[in-house]
Amino acid sequence: MSTILGIDIGTSAVKAVLIDENQTLLAEASAALGISRPEPLWSEQDPDAWIAAVQAAVGEIRQAAPRRFAALGAVGLSGQMHGAVCLDSGQKPVRPAILWNDGRSHPQCAALLERLPGIGDIAGVLPMPGFTAPKLMWVAENEPEIFSRIQTIMLPKDYIRLWLTGETASDMSDAAGSMWLDEASRDWSDAALQATGMARSQMPQLLEGSDPAGTLRPGLAKAWGLTAGVAGNVTVAAGGGDAAVGGVGIGAVNNGDAFLSLGTSGQLFVTTDSYRPSPETMVHAFAHAVPGRWFQMAAMLNGASPLAWFGGITGISAGDLLAELGDDSNPGAGPGEGPMFLPYLAGERTPLNDPHATGQFFGLTGSTDRPAMTRAVLEGVTLSFADCLDRLSQAGTHVESLAAIGGGARSDLWLQMMADAMNARVERTAGAEIGPAFGAARLAIMATGRDAPDVCGKPDVERRFEPDADRHSAWQRQLERFRMLYRATKGLS
């Protein structure tokens, strides 16, 4: 029986899982990544660091399950969205990749909207600095010599595919976050390309996420120790952007399926069976990683990362910070009376579209202690999610139940906060913290010929968190204060 490898190119780490044809987890591994911030608002990574991290993660999996790995039959890919990987004629990076949480291209966003006022309806969202197209406009204006050398634009996971297979390709869901995809027709938009000074010849071929997109290079198959019978026949799927592939991982592939993601970034994601743009709400309407599906998503640049940041500041791990809350960790507690926290450490996309937004504590006193500040961080992120759920409602999407994925989903306290603040049932599913890597493996299974309904079942629910009406009312009052704090201090940022 062949096995399937799922690889997720994240922001802070590469994660990989090995599963069998029945989707049983056989091994998992991760390798850390660093981020370079050479200037204010900048966020970059070396694309070749992703390759090194993939090699490290795969090495761990090979060591954990050598016999099963040697029978590898397919590979699926997921990756951080929007990153600009600029390649020359030799398919080598001409500069570091500019990441999704980079805010330098705000002026270019304004210029793009002026050049193409209908871009929001074409690309599913108004221009924002995180997207790929404005980044290339920035490169053209600020690094013209580098821009002149760019022959191919890729997204992060597609650079890994190039290394795995030698093929230049992307999928609909990842391309959706570039601002160059016509979401309705699922093809590159000539109008968007022209408005940003790009050409179709610089774009990779487009595939559906469950399509095969090449085979593993023989040299790499040999280096990975694959058996002779499978070494030349390992299918690599087109894959997808991490948000969409996370949805595949938890079976959110049918109309109305919804989940929240508490990873480095945060998402509220709802699958739709048609393209439903609502650019004025800052909600993203993108093509899904499976054919014939789209999704609406509130995308937050700050998910679980503020808790990790606070842990770094205090020298205590996120898990220990949560444990330190003690009796205050009672999941039934409503929003506290202590300090408030704005979680905008990397600016914010939905609902603000403000790369200059900053994080801040408000209401500190001489009696404020570390647990109170930890709880404020949790509450701040929770309120950001509640703020975004209102935008989804304005876009015509109403949510009663959400699956939860991402590292932050391991916290009972946080998920109960989410349920109460959003007045929606939240369900933690099995394997929630490895969603995109598992979803990538599912796409690889589909690339070998199996249909989505057969592959994309919903995982078991480990625990349900039901909303409480009284606590929801308290959260709504706190949400108004949260919004007032941002508006009152926006000019100072």
Image (spheres, rainbow, N blue to C red):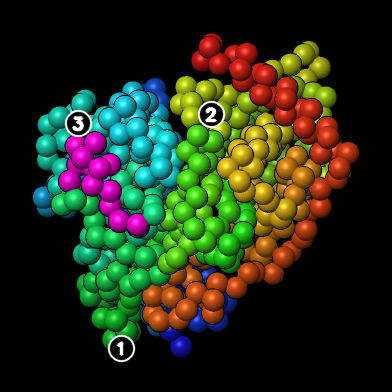
Circle 3 sits on which residue?
140
Circle 2 sits on which residue?
352
Specify which label sits upstream in the sequence, 1 or 2: 1
- Give the farthest residue toward the top: 492
Q: Secondary structure at mark 3?
A: helix
Mark 1: which amino acid?
Gly
Q: Please tell me which residue lies in front, 354 or 124.
A: 124
Mark 2: which amino acid?
Leu
Specify which label sits upstream in the sequence, 2 or 3: 3
- Magenta part of the chain: 185-199
Q: Give coordinates of residue 204: x percent, y percent.
A: 24, 56
Q: Determine crowd level at label 2: few under 14, some 14-19, many 20+ residues with C-alpha closer than 10 A.
A: some
- Is 66 a magenta residue? no
The answer to whether 23 is drawn above or below residue 32 in the figure is below
Residue at position x 59%, y 14% in the image: 489
Q: CA distance from mark 2 to mark 3?
A: 26 Å
The answer to whether 327 is drawn above or below residue 424 in the figure is above
Residue at position x 43%, y 45% in the image: 124
Q: CA distance from mark 1 to mark 2?
A: 53 Å
Q: Give coordinates of residue 472: x percent, y percent.
A: 81, 39
Visible residue check, residue 381: no
Q: Secondary structure at mark 2?
A: loop
Q: Secondary structure at mark 1?
A: loop
Q: Determine crowd level at label 1: few under 14, some 14-19, many 20+ residues with C-alpha closer than 10 A.
A: few
Mark 3: which amino acid?
Ala
The image quarter in which residue 490 lies: top right
Specify which label sits upstream in the sequence, 1 or 3: 3
| Left-right relation of 480 to 204 | right
Give residue 452's mark.
none
Residue at position x 48%, y 46% in the image: 277
